[in-house]
Amino acid sequence: MKERLYLYDTTLRDGQQTPGIDFSVEDKIAIARMLDEFGLDYVEGGYPGANPTDTAFFTEKRTRHARFSAFGMTKRVGVSASNDPGLALLLQSRSDVVCYVAKSSQYQVRVALGCTDEENLDAIRASVEAAIAAGKEAIIDCEHFFDGFKANADYTLACALTAFEAGARWVVLCDTNGGTQPAEVREIVGKVIAAGIPGSHLGIHAHDDTGQAVANSLAAVEAGARQIQGTLNGIGERCGNANLVTLIPTLALKPNYADRFETGITPERLATIAHLSRSFDELLNRAPNAQAPYVGASAFATKAGIHASALAKEPSTYEHVEPESIGNRRKVMVSDQGGKANFIAELKRRGIEVSRDDSRLDTLIAMVKEREAEGYAYEGADASFELLARRTLGTVPDFFSVESFRCMVERRFDVNGQIKTVSEAIVKVVVEGEVRMSVAEGHGPVNALDIALRKDLGRYQSEIEDLELVDYKVRILNGGTEAITRVLIESQDASGARWWTVGVSDNVIDASFQALMDSIVFKLMKNRELAGLVAAE
Amino acid sequence: MKERLYLYDTTLRDGQQTPGIDFSVEDKIAIARMLDEFGLDYVEGGYPGANPTDTAFFTEKRTRHARFSAFGMTKRVGVSASNDPGLALLLQSRSDVVCYVAKSSQYQVRVALGCTDEENLDAIRASVEAAIAAGKEAIIDCEHFFDGFKANADYTLACALTAFEAGARWVVLCDTNGGTQPAEVREIVGKVIAAGIPGSHLGIHAHDDTGQAVANSLAAVEAGARQIQGTLNGIGERCGNANLVTLIPTLALKPNYADRFETGITPERLATIAHLSRSFDELLNRAPNAQAPYVGASAFATKAGIHASALAKEPSTYEHVEPESIGNRRKVMVSDQGGKANFIAELKRRGIEVSRDDSRLDTLIAMVKEREAEGYAYEGADASFELLARRTLGTVPDFFSVESFRCMVERRFDVNGQIKTVSEAIVKVVVEGEVRMSVAEGHGPVNALDIALRKDLGRYQSEIEDLELVDYKVRILNGGTEAITRVLIESQDASGARWWTVGVSDNVIDASFQALMDSIVFKLMKNRELAGLVAAE
């Protein structure tokens, strides 16, 4: 019989404190749906009354399964609960739960509230009672709990006990400044339980200011707490909150937790958490963190030759959990460091079979090492690698060739004396023996070249209509403007597929051209593979 | 009397395993210097013999104070230490230390090595003895230590004890797959010490696969280990290694560690760790993580709201440590009071005096904010900032103006059918009313523009003879080739002075041009300052 752990998401409230993140009502509706469908127990929507967005968001209940929680402050000192307009807004909101933030540090009560210890306790009691009277579940976030406890344990405990005795379902211990260490969390949670609040009513709210929000949350659970507050991808004020996307797989897959506890997240849902994490970044319009635990693109990627050979023999030798269990996948990368096993595994994943003693494999490995010495980085450009491999091992059709190109950037004062910069590119391509010239202007020479290059590819034109450049990276490999330039380009098409290509040259335009060419050829090849026509070409 | 903790950096070795990161020899030299000057105890440089870069890097000793460590495998089974070419390369390298990775899990010995338990123990013993005989310090990284211990504690302990008894200075317990939890680390480290290896000879090597590399490292220290292995900004294979940039401030500033332990990092050095972290990202040409513990731009940032007012009253109410102690700054997004003080300080540092209520100061602050919103990054371009400030507050002479420029890049097949790319630039400058045109070819359009621009500046020409471009960085601020491009250029002159300038545009040539212009004008201004002639202009 496993104990139940409750997951409380505060992405829409504490996550909203992340510098650079501002949710619209539509964002919040979309995120609430994601969280609800994923199976979290509580979704905190924000602070009705604090701003128009949150007030509008709470005009409806936004979850089906999860309990919908409204965050706010305990009643103001000096007015009764029934006469506090802020409290009224909380109680009128369409939430199932009210989560109050309450001062629980004597120092904070003095400095920030400027009221007496007793007045603060009264505010906690009255606010909890008011929520219950309004038919809502009451939760107390004890702000600065750990710092307060270290300074004056008696008063901090009094705040927590007052909330619990007044009927709060959860008393949440907040490490508001994020500086508390796991050993302190473990010890203090133990003392709170000893003081009379059962762990089944205790929650933990951790911040990542020392990089230990996850560890602090787990330490609290080990000490008896049964509710964890966190956010998607660990967004939140300053360094962020405890990352639920990291915590949930650990609770579900690590025996020391999985054997004792269960959450509302089914194995089927867990297998969608990588997708959840990426969709959330997509919504935030930011690049996912490749090194994110469990869900990052690199979380199961191996570069080292010594590891890769063992990994090929038996995956579990270098994987702490199965990538599939969280909807991620294994990636054995090709690189300067890689051994033969990397190459075979990586080619196999691309549907390219080659035997260990095939001399073309040695040619490919030699070529990759040589080119990486020149500055190419194939582990970051899988499409260019696949093209190189297929050219070496199999056949890639010569779809078209570029006879020449010319880029021109001119900056001068226009007739009105305004500085004007014009970029223009001209390309001459040969498709099936037929020469085609295209010219285009663009934002900068690379953009102009990209547009001109894709303007007229004859019979292939229709195939690349949905080809789109989504990212462009330039790295100078050695100092000075005479340096070698590496360009990485990410492309995508209507199918949603994304691929990286690379180009290297002492000339940024040249390097960009190589990467653009690879991207187009890869797209054409990909279309044929799907159509199973590679052989037919 | 505090106990000494030793810090072992593996940025150049395990960090090299990070997908997308490939260090050149020059990169490694620069990073080794940063680490050495910062005060780390050990700098692991890589794996001599594994690839040409690392072999070249180990032809010299690359550190002054830190012990310089070469990583490699224990001797191959079946050959004697003296007949193992890989081992020979390690022993011949210019390192003070050899750090061997040794299998310490029976399962791994069977699956990955395919040799007997005894053969592996012999390899460990012989390899440690060979390093000591070669006059080097020997360290053993026990790969898969924790997983191995859980499966078969006796054999895993035997591997560690064999290394220790053979004379290894450090036996490092590696959580190779990164799945071990802090409670397990604490328990197992305790058992290793009980088995006879003193904590003063134990190290911890943690990975972040469950987001707890920092917590695992600290758990090991609490259990008795006295060496910590990690990397700058937590780069490393898969999800990365323990982040030294997070660990070091915690060890130095959190009483539960600071009261018991000391490291080689002085408070003065600690106050440069934010700079160290950002310089490293700059070198990797990637955007720093704003939410990074301690050093992130958001680590001490507070959004408008309930916290900001309290923070204004008393900073310690919402800060777990003082930002200055790690060279970071407080950011309260509601008032720019903090901002104003920072500006005055920045300007003073450059010998520019301005009073708090000088309206030109407000103009400058507004301008910087506006331009940083456009993508300029003055933190990384001090010369461009100083120019902007002097233009706003004082006077910068109009040395010369550029009427127009034109860049052309052409790629075609030459008479011999070889692909040939030519870059050419033409600039029209006006010096003292006199128009001068210059044309130049270069490696790429920016290099051509640079050469043409500096070809004929009339009376100023002689002053810029010693001006030299030493680094050039391009970052795309938003995806796609239509993205906004930020160019950073580092210049130096014969005096050894170095300065950074910045340019931003949707056109990489335009952005480069701005940065090149700032660099030349800064150099001319600098010359006059030195000559004390700014007023005279």
Image (spheres, coloured by chain):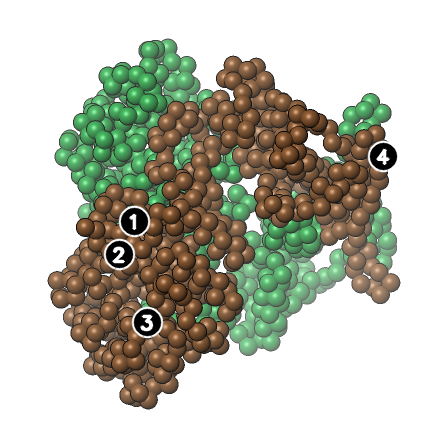
Chain colours: A brown, B green
Sequence-wise, which precedes: disc 1 or disc 3? 3
Looking at numbered disc 1 in the image, what kind of residue is underneath it?
Leu
- Position of A101 compared to A468: left or right? left
Q: Which residue is mark 1?
A: A251
**Residue at the spot 45% in from the left edge and 26% down from the top edge:** A305
Q: How far apart are labels 3 and 4 at the CA level? A: 70 Å
Is residue B207 depicted above or below A197 in this figure? above
Q: Answer yes or no: are tags 1 and 4 on the same subunit.
A: yes
Looking at numbered disc 2 in the image, what kind of residue is underneath it?
Leu
Question: Which element is circle 4 on?
Answer: strand
- Position of A436 compared to B238: left or right? right
**Residue at the spot 61% in from the left edge and 66% down from the top edge:** B370
Number of numbered tags placed on the structure image: 4
Q: Which residue is mark 2?
A: A5
**Residue at the spot 86% in from the left edge and 53% down from the top edge:** B435
Sequence-wise, which precedes: disc 3 or disc 4? 3
Q: Which residue is mark 4?
A: A435
* Camera-side residue of A157 and B497: A157
**Residue at the spot 54% in from the left edge and 20% down from the top edge:** A354
Question: Which element is circle 1 on?
Answer: helix
Q: Which residue is mark 3?
A: A97
Closer to the eye: label 4 or 2:
2
The answer to whether marks 1 and 2 mark residues whose Cβ atoms lie closer than 8 Å is: yes
Looking at numbered disc 4 in the image, what kind of residue is underneath it?
Val
Sequence-wise, which precedes: disc 1 or disc 4? 1
Picture coordinates of residue A91 (x, y %)?
35, 79
